[in-house]
Every structure is written in structure tokens, then in C-alpha cells.
Image (cartoon, helix red, strand yellow):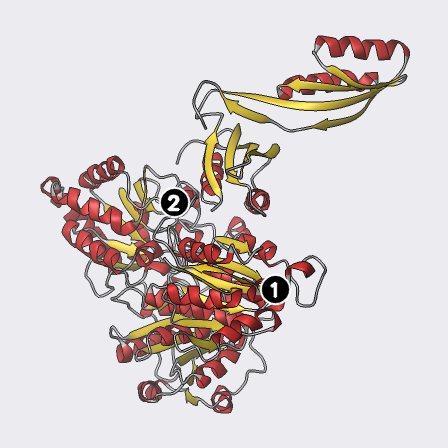
Amino acid sequence: MASREMSGAEMVVKALEDHGVDTLFGYPGGAVLPIYDALFERESIKHVLVRHEQGALHAAEGYARSSGKPGVVLVTSGPGATNAVTGLTDALMDSVPLVCITGQVPTHLIGNDAFQEADTVGITRPCTKHNWLVQSVDDLPRILHEAFYVATHGRPGPVVVDIPKDIQFQIGLYTGPTTQGHRTYRPQVKGNIDSIREAIDLIATAKKPLFYTGGGVINSGPEASQLLREFVHTTGFPITSTLMGLGAFPASDKQWLGMLGMHGTYEANWAMHDCDVMINLGARFDDRVTGVVDKFSPDSKKIHVDIDPSSINKNVHVDVPIIGDVAHVLEDMLRLWKAKAAKQDKGALAKWWKQIDHWRDRKSLEFVNSDTIIKPQHAVQRLWELTKGPDTYITTEVGQHQMWAAQHFHFDEPNRWMTSGGLGTMGYGLPAAIGVQMAHPDALVIDIAGEASIQMCMQEMSTAIQYDLPVKIFILNNEYMGMVRQWQQLLHGARYSHSYSEALPDFVKLAEAYGGVGIRAEKPGELDDKIREMIDVKRPVLFDCRVDKMENCFPMIPSGAAHNEMILADEAKDPTDAISEEGKMLV
Amino acid sequence: MPPKAEIERHTIAVLVDNEAGVLARVIGLFSGRGYNIESLTVAEVDENAHTSRITIVTNGTPMVVEQIKAQLNRLVPVHKVVDLTVDTVSIEREMALVKVSGTGEKRVEALRLSDAFRAAVIDTTHSSFVFEITGSPEKINAFVSLMRPLGLVDVSRTGVVAIARGAEQM
């Protein structure tokens, strides 16, 4: 690879080009002006100017999760970097590959409390996979290439490269990326074949098996989803998934049990509780999934495939750990299984399916619909019916609407569902939708939102207008921070302390003020036509869907309870005493 | 579920790139995840390769100790993590500087005990000694408690360093 002399700022832009970056989300400021200068009239990289740095990070997350490529962000020092922290933490929790470049005050001013100085590497150390403060222009090319390597290899995650302004001006020698691996960071992608063999032996003896899949399948790439489908179909086993894994296996398939966990389906949670062999592929036994750990799937042998060794035995003890990339491990599993399939206990499996069908008959996602008031579940169902297809991408904010979206919008393909799972960041959905639309200009991108969440990054509507991104913001407006209100009802005697969304803006007028389109639906009878109107408008839309204010999200595993102790909608007449005293301590 | 596990003490050696912030990463991991640090020592061990060796003494249930090792291992500048308590047979040493002040019978007794512990006198005045003592943490604990009634003034300890027995490299 030829080397060339250039400024630090030019190196940044060159490295982005060399790593195939076509889209950059950012916000200029004093400490990144040289890099912005290098970007001036550069055709190769589209820069998206956000309205707040948090928006840049979430937009990059949406871009990354929907495309499989790393999201790239450029922000300035001090407040630029501190505003990025929420997005970095979000990406760390949900394993999203991001490269975030931050400007820093010049080297000689570091530590002087200079204007717009912050200890960016110190602040972002716990919320990145790795970060670097560049101390010499000679180190810059290597660090930039390392940044892309670390963000995208192993368990993906966000990285920060903090570049002092003087280094952006200095001239140095730029060398392009090499195909060589990293000096110290060498994640294991191939699973140990003996462990895989042990797993296959265990699976062959299963009488009540269950696949439990997570975001790792999505992160592993489309091939992992294909292999998963093949393996699940070959075995005939039931499958459930975490919030982050939705779409890896088609929701329209008869082996699909729906999402599991706190707001998962009756059949998925009962199957988790009662199974005898659990095959965890790329999920991390998160507390939203396990409920109280002591009572979690007490009688199962557990197989856990994860690329991150620190996920193994962190929350739940597993019997067969396999460290590796899901696609690689599935390939081996499938090959070994095919040599073995004859020994499967078909009788036991049929019995297990009969039991599962019995749980399915409980129809845990049903709700009492109304012809006078729009039920939020109904709104999501109609949205799904009218927009479903491989070219529809859904993002969400965080709260009740997010869970209703997960329950009632069904995904058949991976990378179509972008939500803040681990951190639970209100304000994620709109900027994420902008990132998705940048990656997929012709797709239908919908942010299913709540009226409270949407106001946290509302300013990004302006970004959508500027870049002519026809994202649809579908607000389930119940005038409450719905999930907070639900918990206050369940835990705190229905004392709705500060959870009412007072002084709401008129979302239709707000949309128009931004230069977008506002639509309001208030009656079930007008919902379909209004949704169609929203789809037909090729501009950003704020859709104010007025829904039942007091609807609760069920099923729900109350805090401190086990999977077989769900609260179901039709049993929750007086839900105020549903949670135990110990459970109230939990989040 | 496995039965309720006992708290164990482990000595872990970590070979890292000697770069800015690496110690902060290790310490931040312990504080951020609520792990215990009993002692931690660090120094460069290879000038050419720019690597440092960190020795951490920690305690936790076997599951927590496994977590600590996995978490350390996934830090980018970490080359290697070895649990010297279970992976190998190892030896541990710690050094302490112990200042004792006193005159008369107590002073004589302090000197006599230091001899028994093979501690060296590295500074003295008419009314004080500074002893240098090397050994296991337990030996140093014993020496320090013997010095307490004899006029103990200050203790400075290095924390534990450890290495595996035998010919193998880490």
C-alpha cells in the first residue's frame, strides 16, 4: 500500500473513504473545523447534519443496524462529545458497530480547562468498546484503521477516536488499511468443534427443546439468519427470540412462538420455563428475558453460543458454552446434525408441540377492541397490515408503544427492526429512522413512537426535512408516559406522579411548522385511510394517533416473578397488587 | 442452578500494552461492575515491546472470578490473562517498608523481631527504624501486627506480585 503525505484532517476523510464509508452523521464545531474543511465539496461522502449530537449517534445506529455496515459520526470537542455519550452507551448495550470521531482542544491545551474541553476518552471509556486519544499525527492512520477493525470485529460496538485540533493540521504520512488482524484483539469466530458436538448430542436427546435467539444472529449477518431458518426447519423445534433478535426467524412461520421476556407471549415464556434443552444463539440472558434468575427455566440443559466470552455464565449458568460467531457455529451445527437427525425423538417432540399449542390457545396478545376509541394494539396491527413487506423498516422509541410494536408488528426478515433494547433510550426512534432512510432511500421507514419519547429528539424532524427523507413518525398518543404510568398503577397504588404529558404540542401544526406533513387519527373508523394517506405522502410525516389513555401492555412478567407467573390482560382487572414487595425493588 | 458458591481469593496476572489509559480501563472495569480489588500492582516488564504486567488480587464467587477474567480478556490492549491461583502453581511476594519509632526495650525488641523475619534495616535514627520486609502477604501482616505495640508509625506496601513456578512463559 502506497503512502502519501497529507494533513491529519485529510487522513480522517481518506480513511473513511478507504473503509467504504458513504454516509457520515455529524455536527461541526471549533475543534473539528479542519476535518469539515477536508469534507468540503467532497463527493464521496454524504454528510448528514443533525440538530443535536445524540441524534447523530442514533442515526448512525439506525444506519448500521439496517445495513450491517458500521455507522460513522463526527462531532466536536466538549459538549459535542458529551452529547454523544447517550448514543455511545446505547450502541454498546445493543452491540452496534459505530466509529465516532471527536475533535479535541489542541494538545498543548489539554488539561487546562480550555474552552469546550472535556476529558472525552475518560468520559467515554466505560461506554465504548475502546477509545483512543491521538497524540501524534504519525499514529493517526493506524488508530483510524484499528477503530474500524475493533468496532466491526468480535461483538460489535462503538469506538471513539479523539483527535486534538493541532494534529488535524499537522502533516504526516498516510498508509491505507491492511488486511492484517489486530495485535492484541483477536476474537474467536470458529466455535470449538468438541463443544459443538456435545451440543448436538444434547439436542438429539431433547424431548422439550427450544431455540432462544437474540441480536447476535442479526449481527452475525444475513447468512446467520438463513442458517438459523434451515436448522430450525430441519429439527422441527419451536423458536422464540429476544427483542433484539426479531426478524432473524420469520414471524409468519408456524414454528415461531413470538417474542419472550417481560412482555413476551404466553407460549414463548411457558416454553422457556418448561423446556429441557435450551439452544441460546446470540442472546445474553438479559434480565428482561430471564425474570428472576433463580426461577429461570429450572429444568433445562442450556447451550449458549456467543462471540463474547464475558456473556457466558454472566447471569445464568450454562451447561454447554460455545464461544464463536453464530453463523460459523450454526454451519458446524447443521453439518453435524444432518449426520445425526435419525435419532431424534419424534414422539416426544409431537407431545411438546401439543403442549405449546395448548399455551398458544390462551391467545395472550388478544385485547378488547373498541369501535369508539383507537386501541394502541389495534393501531399497530393496522399499521402492520397496511405496510408489511420486505421494504418496510421499523424503528421505535422506548415504552409501551415499543412493546406493542414488538408484539403486533411481525418481521419476516432481519435488519428491519431497530429499537433501543439494552439502554432503553427514549428519543432513539426518529434519528434512527433517519439513519435507516439514508441507508435505504427507497424504503418505507416508520418510527413507531410515543408522544413523550418523540419529544426527546424532536429536533431531528428538521434533519429529515433538510435531506428530504420521507420518514413516518407514527405516534401512539395516550398523553402519558405510558410505561411509567403502567408501573405506577401496578407498583404505586395508581398514583400517577409526573407521568402525564401535559402541555403537548399540536403535532399536526408542529409537523407543518417544520415543513412536513401532519395527520391526526382519533376514531378507529378513520385509521386505515389515514395510514394509507401517510404511506402515500413522500415527505416526512408526523402521525398523531390518539389512542386509549389507560391501556396497559400485557402479558407482563411482574418484577420478581418467574416465566410461568405472567399477568395476562383478561386477568388484570385489579392489577395494583400484582407485584410482590421484593419485586418492587427491581426495575 | 449450581449450589451457592463460596467466595474465593484469586491472583490474576494481566499482560497489557503499556499505553495511556490502560490502567484506568482495568480499574474502571472493577469499579464499574462492582468487583473487588484486594491489591493491584503494575509496572512495565518489556521495554521494547512496551508491555506492562498487572497483578490483581481479587475475590468473588467462581462465577464472578470467571467474569472478571472474561471482562479483562476483552479489553483491547490486553495480551493475556492468567489466573495464577488455578491455571498454575505460583508464588506470591509482597514488599513492605515499615517505620517503627521507640527507645529502650521496645527498640531492642523491634530489632530482634526484624531479624527473626529477615527484615532489613534500611534507615535508622536514635529513635526509629525503617525495615524492608519481603514475603507472602500473611508474613507481612504478622510482622506489622508484631510491630504495632512496639511503636509502629507507618507502613507502605507494594501489593502482591506473583509468577508461575517452572520453566514456562506466561
Residue to which mark 1 is pinned:
A166
Frontmost residue, A354 versus A210: A210
Tag 1: amino acid:
Asp
- Chain assignment, label 1: A
Where disc 1 sits, the SS reads helix
Q: Is residue A344 above or below residue A432?
A: above
Mark 1 → mark 2, Cα distance in angstroms? 33 Å
Residue at the spot 90% in from the left edge and 14% down from the top edge: B103
Q: Is residue A205 left or right of residue A380?
A: left
Residue to which mark 2 is pinned:
A186
Q: Residues within 10 Å of mark 1 (few under 14, many from 20)?
A: some
Whether residue B54 is visible, yes or no, is yes
Where disc 2 sits, the SS reads loop
Residue at the spot 62% in from the left edge and 72% down from the top edge: A30
Which one is closest to the eye, mark 1 or mark 2?
A: 1
Q: Is residue B50 above or below residue A449?
A: above
- Chain assignment, label 2: A
Residue at the spot 50% in from the left edge and 76% down from the top edge: A50
Q: Is residue A502 above or below residue A362?
A: below
On-image quarter of the N terminus of chain A: bottom left
Report if the CB atoms under discs 1 and 2 are less than 8 Å apart: no
Frontmost residue, A570 versus A49: A49
Whether residue A495 is visible, yes or no, is no
